[in-house]
Image: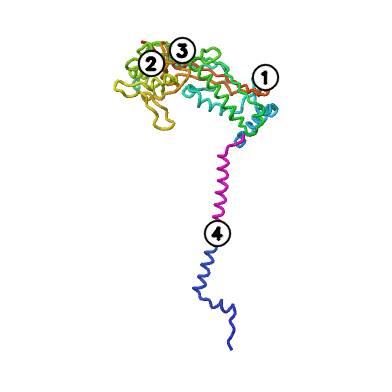
Amino acid sequence: METPLNSDSVVGNVPADLEESFDIVARQDKAEAEIRRLRGDVDEVKSRLDKVARAATRPSIAGRETQSAEVKGFVEGYLRRGRESEIKSIQGTTPGEGGYAVPRELDAIIARELTEISPIRTIAQVVRVGTSGYRKLIATGGTASGWVSETAARPATSTPDFAEIAPPTGELYANPAASQAMLDDVAFDLEAWLAAEIAAEFARAEGAAFVNGTGTNQPEGFLRAPTGLAADDTRAFGQLQYIGSGSATGFDDEPDAKLIDLIHSLKAGHRQGACFVMNSTTLAAVRKLKTSDGAFLWQPGLVEGQPDRLLGYPVIEAEDMPDIEGGAFPIAFGNFRHGYLVTEQGATKLLRDPFTNKPFVHFYATRRIGGQVLDSNAIKLLKIEA
């Protein structure tokens, strides 16, 4: 009679190499399970990152996804509903003093829009000042110096000369309006709309003032400065040098020669960063100019975002520059970062006015801005004259 087999006897008789194979398979199963778990964790992390990326690129409603508490209180509480109590704790002024100073983020948006659309501001030197009585000392001559040996006495040098400028300032204002229905619509991006409207009005007004401003309750434009033919070393401080075009009505037969003279009337230190400034009508005429051998003076930008160039220098379009006509100064060339100073006093102030023009709500924005020629050696003009 045969003895029946039991499981203990079977297991006990398993060969060593087969038992080792079972252990390998078990470890592989465990490793695959761990890999699947790790892949699941990675997929979950990727899913979360995708959600964050989609949220970052998704257009926000009224900027709520990026607004700070200060901006949200200002936009949603004061601008939309006129609740002054929500912003008195975070704003420093009252309507009786000229309106509420807008939050820093909103003021930065307005400043960024201004820089993009205001041509002279883009190239000029801009400083923030604390008062409207800002003054600046300008050295009108180089600092005196001398050469000596190692042990020689150091004789006294002459004292440098200084001139003082005080850029005229004025209060620039804009008064855009929106209906109450627009303000009640949560999908209406009030912050972006208001910043764009204020910046557009400010850019139009200040662009004209920086070129032709009278200096009375507004900046003094660089074309209002006195002009003369004298070179830098003999010209009075604040007087701009000009080059004649060679014709009483436009350009002569060698326009490239006059423009080259204009470029090199500027000292080498100012030519680094210099540009041409003219309006679109003058620009259309300049683009047709050719040298004596038939080559165009105009050089279009070859890369997107790179400015077009005239004789190697970028061209800035400022519509407030005069057209080409007898006695006018249609073209300016210079380093405006060195040559023209723009001053800004404080942040933009805003007053909500729902009463003057019902059912529209007006937003009265003000900003004190000044401007004046800083270094008259850094800007040159082309005058239409024989």
Q: Say which of marks 1 and 2 sits in front.
A: 1
In depth, the one of 373 and 59 nearer the eye is: 59
Answer whether labels 1 and 2 touch (C-beta < 8 Å): no
At which x and y percent is residue 196? 56, 27
Residue under label 2: 155
Colouring scheme applied when the structure was drawn: rainbow
Cα–Cα gap, marks 2 and 4: 84 Å
Residue under label 1: 356
The mark that comes first in sequence, 2 or 4, is 4
Residue under label 3: 225
Question: Which residues, given as a range, are shown in magenta?
Answer: 34-61
In depth, the one of 39 and 55 nearer the eye is: 55
Q: Residue 33 vs residue 93: left or right? A: left
Res 50 visible: yes
Q: Residues within 10 Å of mark 4 (few under 14, many from 20)?
A: few
Cα–Cα gap, marks 1 and 3: 40 Å
Quarter occupied by residue 323: top left
The amino acid at mark 1 is Thr
Q: Say which of marks 1 and 4 sits in front.
A: 1
The mark that comes first in sequence, 4 or 3, is 4
Answer whether labels 1 and 4 touch (C-beta < 8 Å): no
Label 3 secondary element: loop
The amino acid at mark 2 is Pro
Residue under label 4: 34
